[in-house]
Image: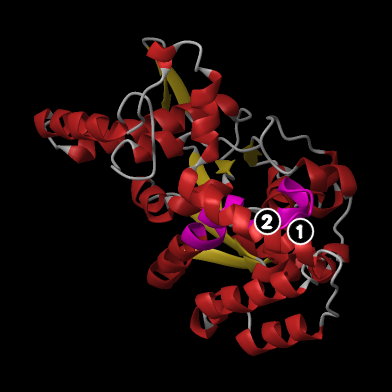
Amino acid sequence: MDSTKRGGVLEVTDLRPVFLFSLPRSGSTLLQRMLGTHSQISTVSEPWILLPYLHSLRRSGTYSEYWHRNMVGAIDDLCDALPNGREDYLCEVRELALRLYAKAAQPGVRYFLDKTPRYNLIVEDVMNLFPDGRFVVLWRNPLAVVASVLETFSGGRWMTHLHKVDLFEGLERLLDAYARRSGEFVSVRYEDLVSEPAAEAGRVVAHLGLDWEAGVIEDFAQGRLQGRVGDQTGIRQYVQVSQVPLDKWKRTLASPVRKLWCRRYLSWIGGERLALMGYDLDLLRAELDEVPTQLSSLAPDVAQTARGVVWSVAEPRILRDKLARLPRWHRIYSHY
């Protein structure tokens, strides 16, 4: 990396970003830890930095007390006054991100790896912003993703309504980008990564034009990712690559409500898109059908399904925030 300071501002000339796109709970932290062990790659837990800046040009997707849609209009007006319009604005966002990546990176590395699962909402925006970047997409059996999301973030309770943005919108945008621009990605399946870690990580390293280093596999567990956001569960449980998680989803999704939802979810994804990810619709359906049905969580699952409908429509988190401000009426206002 060739970085110099001029007038107190860090200028980045050689550091290149690598973006690892995936759904949450797809094994992205495992692959990140492997790649971050390479002497030419730096990373931190999950930067998230591009989400607010790229959403500043989107009228939907954000509710705020400062009236987000009006802000987008104001930024559009600002872009109209710039010599090259929106391109100038995006160029400044790009340079800001690169300067921050450079400051977070170790001296002398060639790449900074940004692994932010919620970037599945802005895949093509990121790719357009960094035409010289490198892009990795990590897939995982969608049934295993659903189960792992529930176990990690909802204590195993049937609360898919809290994760719909990733399971549906995020997956759809990720698939759309990959379908249009597959040649720009190196694609990895989680199942292959844990079965043949050296081969799969090696393909990514080769895609970056780097020499293989054995420490990517042998020493990845020794690395520590800075930051509070990210998969702390896997870091605590696994100090070496393990195939144990491959079938754990079957225990989580064994109730009739969950199996019915999963059948519909697989149908929504469809055979063509599953094949794009490297999976077979009929095989996944057969695996799901073979899972012994358990009735122990039937009643709670039905109740959570009804609760999820109300939650999705009413947005209780916003209501809860307003109720907390109730003693000060002047602080209760609409969000746009």
Residue 129, given in percent of the width and then of the height, sits at 35, 45
Residue 92: percent from left, percent from top: 31, 30
Give the percent coordinates (x, y) of residue 15.
49, 37
Q: Are the residues flagged by discs 2 and 1 in contact, CB closer than 8 Å?
A: yes
Question: Which amino acid, by three-letter code, is at mark 1?
Answer: Pro
* Circle 1 crowding by C-alpha within 10 Å: few under 14, some 14–19, many from 20: few
Residue 137: tell me if it is visible.
yes
Q: Which residues are magenta?
A: 150-170
Q: Looking at the image, which residue is at 76% across and 49% down? A: 152
Element type where label 2 sits in the image: helix
Report the disc number at residue 300: 1
Q: Which mark is residue 304?
A: 2
For the residue pair 228 and 72, the one nearer the viewer reads as 72
Q: Position of residue 334 (x, y in %)?
A: 35, 28
Mark 2 Cα shell of 10 Å, populated few (<14), some (14-19), many (≥20): some
Q: Is residue 93 above or below residue 266?
A: above
Marks 2 and 1 sit apart, C-alpha to C-alpha, by: 6 Å
